[in-house]
Image (tube, coloured by chain):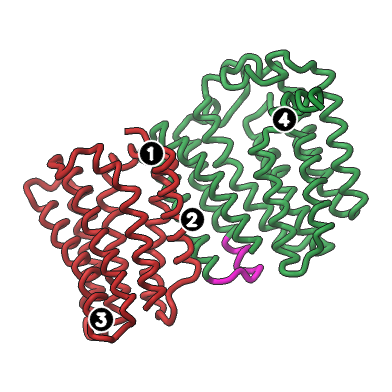
Amino acid sequence: MKTFLAKFKLYWPLTKSLQTGLLLSTGLAGYMSARCPVMHWYDFLGMGISLFLAIAGSTILNMWYDRDIDSVMKRTHHRPLASGRISPTEALRLGLVLSTLGVGLAVSMDALYGLIVFAGLFFDVVVYTFWLKRRTCWSIVWGGISGGMPILAGRAFGLGYIDPIGILLTLAVLFWIPTHILTFSMRYHEDYQAAKIPTFPSTYGFAATRATIAVSSVLAALSIGVAGTLIGMEWGFVRLLVVLSAGLFLLAVASVFRPTERINFGLFKYASLYMLCAMILLSL
Amino acid sequence: MKISILDRILLLLTGLLAAWQVAVGINGADTLPMIAYTVGFGVILVAGLLLIILGFDALDSPLVVIVSTIIPLSLSLGLVWEHLAAWRTGYLVFAIVGFLAILLTRLLPVKGKTPTIVLACVHGVAGMVIFLLPCILAINGATQPGFALVGVGGALIGIGGLLLSFLKAGRPILPRETILRILPGLLLLMTAAFVAGFALA
């Protein structure tokens, strides 16, 4: 038991639990937006487990592949793989096992759902991490598409097919990703430079990056708002979503016209909180 | 001054109360007061979240004076529109002109005491409306007695506004540390009084 707990403690940071949890919440919200108030708990549980395994698996595979980058970045050099506390082979095995279990469970539950979960994993690991991340700053578009797959998968699982609202929700996550990633790449600009990873700030400068964040924040908020209205969200929740979106928009504008490190990181944190709140509202 | 865990909890509770009020709305309110109340409680919600995320340093922004004006102006506009039909248009004009005046005197380089006078007039009128109107309506029996709690919220927002305004003007009534220590609790009490008052009306 002690060995198991020790291993669990060692493996857990590999999953980036907060990021995985946030993506998982989008998947569950997608399902509940289609099924509420009638839903089956065994489907809900199976979907939660399969999504968690697939997202955690792909995150571990990313970390396995990027261990050389992590070891030269101040922010990430203490991670289990970069610091040598876990061997690359062990991490690779764990990532492959979790990914296979997640996609396998998803396919066994529903073929379309499994296909979307697999697409998310493929875009994230192969297209984003293996292929584009070290070549172009535009790789985040593919990172965004893969980030949008859990909510699409959840909704498609609830409905049995892909509908325009599901696409809109995917776009919402896709547009939200730049707010999340670009604020982060500005905060750790020197780290990314040291690791020779092309980012928006290093390619187009900070001002253009801030403008991109502001525009994508507005598009994300609009997409979620329109999707929520089309789903038939209660007006009270729409009002709340508008208020939270206004906060996101004002922070993004403030980061353009009065840029400071604190506003930038505040926007990063607010964007995460905003997405979580939006997912809760979509689920109610 | 660093924000403490207790401060964060108090601000989170404030945000949750404001979010709840935005979501449930005000029973029987027309479109304009509903928008006004949503704006008022929405600003409280977002301000609470930003204080949690950015800490008390967020209060150093020059935008704080402008944003903090929105709360009393919007809530008082909602109250006047609902309960003083004859004053609707006049107060709507006052709210818009007052907000624009504060916006201009804060963003443009205006010399002298004009910005302070404008701020005091607009805040003063809006604050008195939020404090007095619910109390008078409750005493007259036009509403349930519990509606007077909105007036209590108005008094608390007035105290908070005064403390912050004088602090921003460089002539603090209380030391900065004391103001920041009581601010989260004051915001929570104020929001709770508003929410309870509207629920009991």
| Viewer-side residue, B142 vs B30 | B142
Q: Nearer the viewer, mark 2 or mark 3?
A: 3
Asked if the residue at tag 3 contacts the one at tag 4, i.e. Cβ–Cβ closer than 8 Å, the answer is no
Identify the residue under disc 1.
B55
For the residue marked with disc 2, what is the amino acid? Leu
Q: What numbered label is drawn on residue A12?
A: 4
Disc 3 target residue = B137
Per the image, the residue denoted by label 2 is: A244
Q: Quadrant of residue B36?
A: bottom left
* B162 sits to left or right of A178: left
Could you confirm whether marks 4 and 2 are on the same chain? yes
Residue A190 magenta:
no
Tag count: 4
Residue A211: % across, % down: 47, 41
Q: Chain of mark 2?
A: A
Residue B88 to residue A259: above or below: below
| x 14%, y 57%: residue | B120
Give the alpha-carbon distance from disc 3 to disc 1, as whole Å: 38 Å
Secondary structure under tag 1 reads loop
**Of all residues shown, which one is farthest toward the left?**
B112
Q: Colour of chain B?
A: red
Q: Is residue B81 left or right of residue A54?
A: left
Q: Chain of mark 1?
A: B
Q: Given contact means CB atoms under 8 Å apart, are the residues at marks 4 and 2 in contact?
A: no
- Between the residue at mark 4 and the residue at mark 3, the CA separation in whole angstroms equals 59 Å
Residue at the image point whose x is 22% and y is 38% from the top: B176
In the image, which residues are magenta? A225-235
